[in-house]
Amino acid sequence: MCNSTARANGGVRAPIIGNVGGHRGPNLSTVGRTATKAAIRNHIVNGSNVMPAFGDVLEAQKINDLVEYLRSCRKKPEEYHPGQ
C-alpha cells in the first residue's frame, strides 16, 4: 500500500518502510514501536516541520487505514538490510 501510494504521489520524498521508499523522507520502519495512534494521526492530519498536512487531502477512511498500517510497522531496525 505505502509503496504504491508514495510512487503515485511523487515518491522521491516518500518515507522509507523496510527497504522501500524515497530517499528524502524519514524511515518509518519502526514507527509502530514508538508512536501512538493519536500521534501518528496528528502528524498525518496536521503535518509537522518535515511533513505536509494531509488532513484536507485524504478521506477519513484513508487516514484511518494509514494509521493502522503505520502502527503495524514494528520491526526492529536490525531486521532490515538496506541495499539488499
Image (cartoon, rainbow, N blue to C red):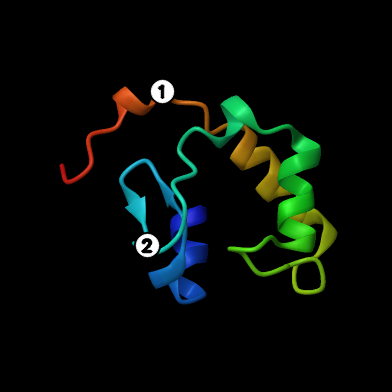
For badge 1, the amino acid type reads Lys
Side (left or right) of 55 relative to 29:
right
> In the rendering, at what x and y percent does residue 31 appear?
56, 36
Q: Residue at x 58, y 63 (%)?
A: 50
Query: 4 or 76, which is in the foreground?
Result: 76
Q: On the image, numbered disc 2 is attached to which residue? A: 22
Which of the two discs, 1 and 2, labels the residue nearer the N terminus? 2
Residue 24 circle label: none
Q: Residues within 10 Å of mark 1 (few under 14, many from 20)?
A: few
Q: Is residue 30 visible?
A: yes
User: Could you say whether the residue bearing mark 2 is in a helix, strand or loop?
Assistant: loop
Give the CA separation, mark 1 to mark 2: 20 Å
User: Looking at the image, which residue sits at the far front?
Assistant: 49
Q: Which residue is mark 1?
A: 76
Q: Residue 62: in sight, yes or no?
A: no
At a point 30% along the width and 24% down the height, the residue shown is: 78
Label 1–label 2 contact, CB within 8 A = no
Q: Residues within 10 Å of mark 2 (few under 14, many from 20)?
A: some
Q: Residue at 82% x, 73% y: name it.
A: 56
- Which amino acid type is shown beneath numbered disc 2? Gly
What is the x, y in percent for residue 16? 41, 51
Residue 54, x across and y down, in percent: 73, 67
Residue displayed at 37% across by 41% down:
18
Q: Quadrant of residue 11?
A: bottom left
Q: Is residue 3 above or below residue 38?
A: below
Residue 40, quarter of picture? top right
